[in-house]
Amino acid sequence: MALVAKICRCEPRSRAHGLCHSISRWKGASRSQVLAAQRAEFVALGLLAGPLLGIACVAVNMVAGARAALNQPPLIALREV
């Protein structure tokens, strides 16, 4: 895995990224090393994207709930609680 990480220096979203793994294989990385590097990339993306999407969902629900509560007169909102 360290060999693949040293060889692949391109941006993850670039067109050349797929070539990095091909070049890694050409330079001598085994199939398991390339797969381990791909798994590590997906784990890193999941660790970043998961909390960010969770925060975005909470924010959207918070705004929607606040609008629903603030669009009513205070007495009606308090009676519903």
Image: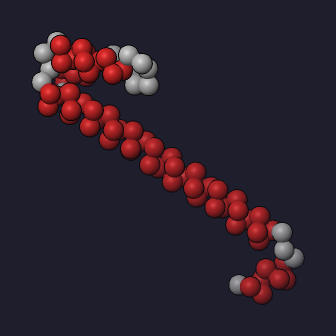
Q: Quadrant of the C terminus?
A: bottom right
Q: Residue at x 77, y 83 (%)?
A: 78
Q: Quadrant of the N terminus?
A: top left
Q: How far from the left and from the top, in percent, is residue 49?
A: 45, 43
The answer to whether residue 6 is seen in the rendering is: no
Q: Is residue 37 left or right of residue 73?
A: left
Residue 39 vs 19, above or below: the answer is below
Q: Residue at x 76, y 69 (%)?
A: 68
39 vs 58, nearest the viewer: 39
Q: How far from the left and from the top, in percent, is residue 56?
A: 58, 51
Total marks in image: 0
Residue 35 vs 21, above or below: the answer is below
The color scheme shown is secondary structure
Displayed quadrant of residue 28: top left
Q: Is residue 51 left or right of residue 42?
A: right
Residue, far bottom: 79
Q: Residue at x 14, y 31 (%)?
A: 32
Residue 18 vs 79, above or below: the answer is above
The answer to whether residue 38 is seen in the rendering is: yes
Residue 34 vs 20, above or below: the answer is below
Q: Residue at x 28, y 36 (%)?
A: 40
75 vs 56, nearest the viewer: 56
Displayed quadrant of residue 11: top left
Q: Is residue 60 left or right of residue 79?
A: left
